[in-house]
Structures are given as structure tokens and as C-alpha cells.
Image (spheres, helix red, strand yellow):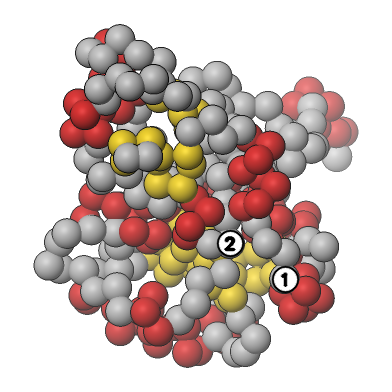
Amino acid sequence: MFDTLKSRIYQGQQFIKDIENAPMREQFRGLPVLKNACGQDLTKCAQACPTGALSLEPLSIDMGKCTFCGACQNVCKNVCNSDAISFSNSYKLSATSADRLIITENMTKEEFEKTAIKVRKEITSIFSKSLKLRQVSAGGCNGCEMELNACSNCNFDMGRFGIDFVASPRHADGIVITGPVTKNMAYALEDCYKSVPAPKIVIVCGACAISGGIYQNSTEIDREFFEKHPVDLYIPGCPVHPLTFINGVLGLIRK
């Protein structure tokens, strides 16, 4: 017993106390920052983007497609000699609409966060105290899946907010989708969704799930699911950071 207490004192506080204002390392690529290009030719920046997330007319980045690889920023800085494209280390990237994931020129962090998540009374009234989720890897690379697994470790401790992943869709309040939804996972995803009792929510995580990511033009994906069922929360990333996921879900279910 005393050895356990000694170990606890030695290790100190392991969990992140203020999950909504936790510091992030400077190297983290989060919310894009786009400055007025002032007529500069950024064509090569757009060509460097592997998913077509960067548009030039007008200048914007779709975080639903963005893999946060930084290629556009590197080309912008080193080839175009411009600082028009950069990334902040802000990890609050989630939105309740795919349209709100599009970052435009001179959009600030405060402006994005103010409009990104639209709180819905029917969700907060039911799920604000407890939310159980079934995660479905619909052809993912296991990057987002590993990060979602980390949400429940001692550092992030998502369970303290009443948010947990469960083994069965019949015990869940909604599903979390990762991966581009391959043909061989389309039926399983649909079956899982139908097995979750109503009312239920749908959360999509990562560029692959939101837009198809680097696989968006593949003939081996089947995204019919998103044509039939509404999505309640979009969480960008490649992969999604635990802080991004937890803050996104909290923004959805809290009043």
C-alpha cells in the first residue's frame, strides 16, 4: 500500500486538468492561417496539396480534405517566397457542418470557434451527461484509430466527462467513423448504424472519413452511407489528435 502511495506521489498528476485549454506544442499543425496573397501566384502551393484541399479563388483551405502535411506551407515559403499560408497550433478544429470546415482569408481562431459548432438542444438534453460511442474503422490506416484509443488513457481521460467507447453498437448512443469507407466495410458500417438504438448521433473523424482524403478518387470506396444518413460532427485531422476529438465532442454535447 505504501509503495503504491509513494509511486503516486512520485508520478504526480498524470491527467490533463484543463482539457479545453491545454497547451499544445508549437510544431503541431492545427487551424490554418491564410493571409491576403496580394496578387501573388500561389498555383504551385495548390499543386503541392495531395487532396485538393487548397483553393486559390478565393484563397481557402478545406479542413475536411486537408491532411495537415504542410506541403502547401513549405512551397509557399520556399518557392513562392510568401507567408500567405501557414498553420497555427490550435487543435479546436471540429464543426457541425462540412461548410464550416472551410477556412478563408484572414479568418481568426476566435471567428472559427464562434461559428464552427452549432449547439442543438435535442443533443445536449439527451447526451450532455453520458455519451457512449461505437467506433467503426471503415478501411482506416489505424492512425485515427490509435489516437482515439489514446482518448481514454490516463493523460486525456475522456471518461471523466461521461464519454466512453463501447464494444457493442447496442450499448451505444452513436458511432464514430474513421477511414474512407471501403466497399468491403460499407455493409458493416450500415449494419452497425442500424444496430444503435435511436436517438443516435454520427461523428466522422479524419480527412479519410470526412471527404475520402487521399483515397477520394479511388474506385474501391463506397460512401453511399453519407448520402443516406446525416452527420452531427466533423472532426478534421490526419490523424485526429485526442484533444481535437475530446473538445469537439464536448462542444457538441454541452449546453
Image marks 2 and 1: residues in contact by CB distance under 8 Å: yes
Q: How far apart, in angstroms, are the residues tagged by discs 2 and 1?
A: 10 Å
The percent position of residue 38, horizontal first and vertical second, equals 39, 20
Instruction: Residue under label 1, please give it.
Output: 120
From the viewer's perspective, is 56 left or right of 231? left
In this rendering, does residue 188 appear at all? yes
**Vertical placement of residue 226 versus 195, above or below:** above
**Image x and y of residue 229, in percent:** 45, 81
**In this rendering, does residue 242 appear at all?**
no
- Going by the image, does 79 lie left or right of 251? left
The answer to which of 52 and 40 lies nearer the viewer is 40
Give the answer, above or below, for where 8 lies relative to 115: above
Residue plotted at (57% across, 55% down): 95
Q: Amino acid at mark 1?
A: Arg
Residue at figure coordinates x 47%, y 59% from the top left: 98
Among the 4 quarters of the image, the one containing residue 221: bottom left
Q: Mark 2: which amino acid?
A: Thr
Q: Which mark is residue 96?
A: 2
